[in-house]
Image (cartoon, rainbow, N blue to C red):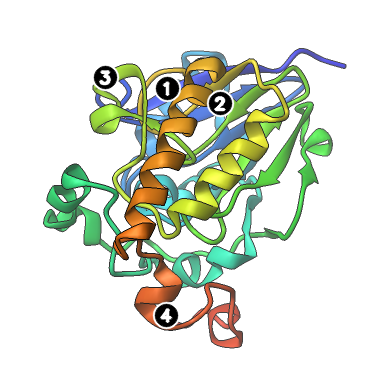
Amino acid sequence: MAHTTVIPVPVMGRRNVNAYLLLGRRAVLVDTGIPGSGAKILARIAEHGIGPGDVSAIVITHAHIDHFGSAAELRRATGAPVLAHIADLGPYTTGRIREPYLPTGRFGRFLDRLDAFHEQAEPFRPDLLIDGATALHEHGVDARIMPTPGHTAGSISVLTDEGDLVAGDLIATSFLGMARRRPANPPFHDDPVANLASLRAMLALKPSTLHVGHGGPLDPARVERWAAREQHRLEKLDARGRLRTRAEVCGTAEKPTNAEQGGVGGGC
C-alpha cells in the first residue's frame, strides 16, 4: 500500500474554500472551487510537482457552486474523468444548484442574499456516476468514496486507507473557515438530520483527521463533541416544528428523477 498524502488546495482565501489533492501512486483532485478557478488550482498543484496530465481523476463531493464550479474546465485541462454521485446529477448537467438554499443559521441567510451563490457554472456530465462506496485504487490512491447524504442528496466524502477523511461540507469550521479548528455547520444543509447521521457514520470509522471544504483540519474527538450538541439542537428545533428539509420544502422525496437523469432542472 502506498502512502496517500492529503494536501489542501486553497481556492478562496487561506482556507475559506478548499479543494484537495490526494497524492499516492498518482494524483486525485477532490473538488474544483467556484467557476473560473481552474488556472488557480492547476498553479497550486504544480507547486507539488503535479502537472495537468498527472491528475488521474477528479472527485466532486456535492453539487454546490463552490465545489463543482470548475469541474468542466479542469476535465478539459487534465483529461481526467470526473466522479460524482448520481443523486446530484441534475445540478451538474444544468450547471445550477437546487434552490432554494436551506440556511443553517444567520450566516447562511446572509450568504443566500449574495449573487455569487446563485451563479451558473458550466454544465458537465460526470464520467462515472457513484451510487455506493467506490474504491479509488485504480486511480492511484488508496482511498474510497463514501456516500454521505444530507448536505445534498448526492454528497460524498473520501476516506483514505490511512484514515484521512476528505469530508466536503459534511462539517465545516465557523464562518467559512475563519475560525480554523472550531467545528460548525456549513451555511446550508438540505437535510440536517440526514447529514448528522452521515457524519456520525464516518466518525464511527475512526478517521484520524477531517479535511473540510471550508476551514482547516478538524480533530475527530472535537467533532464528536460538537455532534452531540448538534443532535440536541436539532431535537429542539424538531419539537418546535422548525426543522426543515428540502423534501418538505419541495414537497417531494429527494432522489434522482428520470428528468434529472436526463439533465433537466436544478431547483425543486
**Residue 19 at what x, y percent from top left?**
45, 32
Q: Residue at x 45, y 58 (%)?
A: 191
| Nearer mark to the viewer, of 3 and 1 | 3
Q: Which residue is mark 4?
A: 265
Sequence-wise first label, 3 or 1: 1
Say what amino acid the circle numbered 4 marks.
Gly
Q: CA distance from mark 3 to mark 1?
A: 23 Å
User: Which SS class for mark 1?
Assistant: helix
Q: Are marks 2 and 3 in contact (CB under 8 Å)?
A: no
Q: Tag 1: residue type?
A: Arg
Label 1 crowd (10 A; few <14 / some 14-19 / many >=20): some
Query: In this image, 60 relative to 95: left or right?
Result: right
Residue at the disc numbered 2: 21
Instruction: Look at the numbered discs 3 and 1 and tell me whether their residues touch, using CB distance below 8 Å.
Output: no
Left-right relation of 257 to 183: right
Residue 187 in the image: state x and y as whole percent. 29, 45
In the rendering, at what x and y percent does residue 77 appear? 51, 44
* Mark 1 lies on residue: 44
Q: Dot 3 corresponds to which residue?
A: 179
Q: Are marks 2 and 1 in contact (CB under 8 Å)?
A: yes
How crowded pointer 4 is (Cα within 10 Å; few <14, some 14-19, many 20+) is rated as some
Q: Residue at x 53, y 25 (%)?
A: 224
Q: What residue is at 46 percent from the left and 41 percent from the top? A: 231
Q: Residues within 10 Å of mark 2 (few under 14, many from 20)?
A: many
The residue positioned 72% from the left and 60% from the top of the image is 131
Which disc is residue 210 wearing?
Answer: none
Q: Earlier in the sequence, mark 2 or mark 1?
A: 2
Residue 176, above or below 169: above
- Mark 2 → mark 3, Cα distance in angstroms: 22 Å
In-front residue for pair 136/178: 178
